Image (cartoon, rainbow, N blue to C red):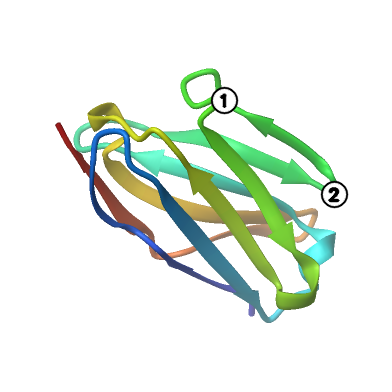
Amino acid sequence: QVHLVESGGGLVQAGGSLRLSCVLSGGTFNTYIMGWFRQAPGKDRLLVARLAGNNAATSESVEGRFTISKDDAKNTLYLQMNNLQPDDTAVYYCNANDLAGEYWGQGTQVTVSS
């Protein structure tokens, strides 16, 4: 059973930074396409960044500010978030998927004050 646990969320002022972490257990980390999604209150869950092997992609809304990366030895996915803005306020979710299925973490809250 694949299990994802996120951490690193919190309250930060506009312009600040946070780094989210997601630890995967119960699966072979480097076989999954990994991603970060976010969901603001009353809105859909949207893709923020995705990492397939060493190929990374970020959404236009965060490009140049957020960076997705991983440490295969630690089974951990990261999201470095710089120059955070109030519009980045959301619950951030880690996602892993392969041909067998799709898995989600419980989410971590990121709140950016103006």
Which residue is painted at 65% across and 57% down in the image?
96
| Disc with the residue nearer the chain's start (1 vs 2) | 2
Residue furthest top in the image: 60
Furthest residue to the left?
A: 114
Is residue 90 found left or right of 20 in the rendered image?
A: left
Residue pointed to by mark 1: 64
- Disc 2 marks a residue whose amino acid type is Gly
Say which quarter of the image contains residue 70: bottom right
Residue under the image location 61 percent in, 47 percent down: 35
Give me the disc on residue 53: 2
**Image position of 44 (left or right of 36):** left
Q: Nearer the viewer, residue 82 or 52?
A: 82
Left or right: residue 65 compared with residue 107: right
Q: Quadrant of the N terminus?
A: bottom right
Which element type, helix, strand or loop, lies under badge 1?
loop
Residue 25 vertical placement versus 106 (above, below): below
Label 1: how many Cα within 10 Å (few below 14, some 14–19, many 20+): few
Q: Position of residue 114 (x, y in %)?
A: 14, 31
